[in-house]
Amino acid sequence: MRYENQKDLPATITHVLPDDAQKVYLETYNRAWDEYDQETIGDMSRHSVAHRQAWATIEQAFERDPNAGTWQRK
């Protein structure tokens, strides 16, 4: 399912990512969701594929401070 706005994102995303990272996650997730119109892609669900792509984008653009546990742009 697509996420309409940041308020729809799961708590596991909203509790760890700052606002700008949430926006990136939302946009990337929805783009991947639209790209894959099948419910399963190989052995992964459509949601899993979209989440994996969105999280990979986060890891490319942001870094986690291991001491504080917070994420910020690279």
Image: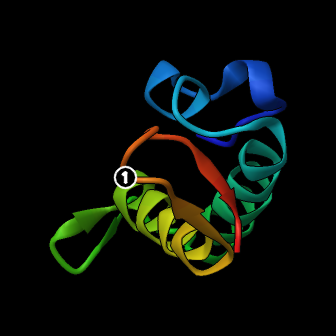
Does residue 48 appear left or right of residue 50 in this picture?
left
Residue 65 on image: x %, y %: 48, 54
Residue 28 on image: x %, y %: 71, 65
Q: Is residue 46 above or below residue 43?
A: above
Which part of the image, by quadrant, shows the C terminus? bottom right
Q: So how many labels did they put on this image?
A: 1
Q: Give the image quarter of residue 46.
A: bottom left
- How many neighbours does mark 1 have within 10 angstroms: few (below 14), some (14-19), or many (20 or more)? few
Q: Tag 1: residue type?
A: Pro
Q: Foreground residue, 50 or 12?
A: 12
Does residue 34 appear left or right of residue 53 in this picture?
right
Q: Is residue 25 above or below residue 57?
A: above
What residue occupies the far left of the structure in this picture? 43
Does residue 53 appear left or right of residue 22 in this picture?
left
Q: Is residue 3 above or below residue 21?
A: above
Which part of the image, by quadrant, shows the N terminus? top right
What residue occupies the far front of the structure in this picture? 67
Residue 70 on image: x %, y %: 54, 41
User: Which residue position holds label 1?
Assistant: 66
Q: Foreground residue, 4 or 68?
A: 68
Residue 34 on image: x %, y %: 70, 66
| Residue drawn at (41%, 67%) of the image | 52
Q: Secondary structure at mark 1?
A: loop
Does residue 46 appear left or right of residue 18 in this picture?
left
| Residue drawn at (35%, 57%) of the image | 48
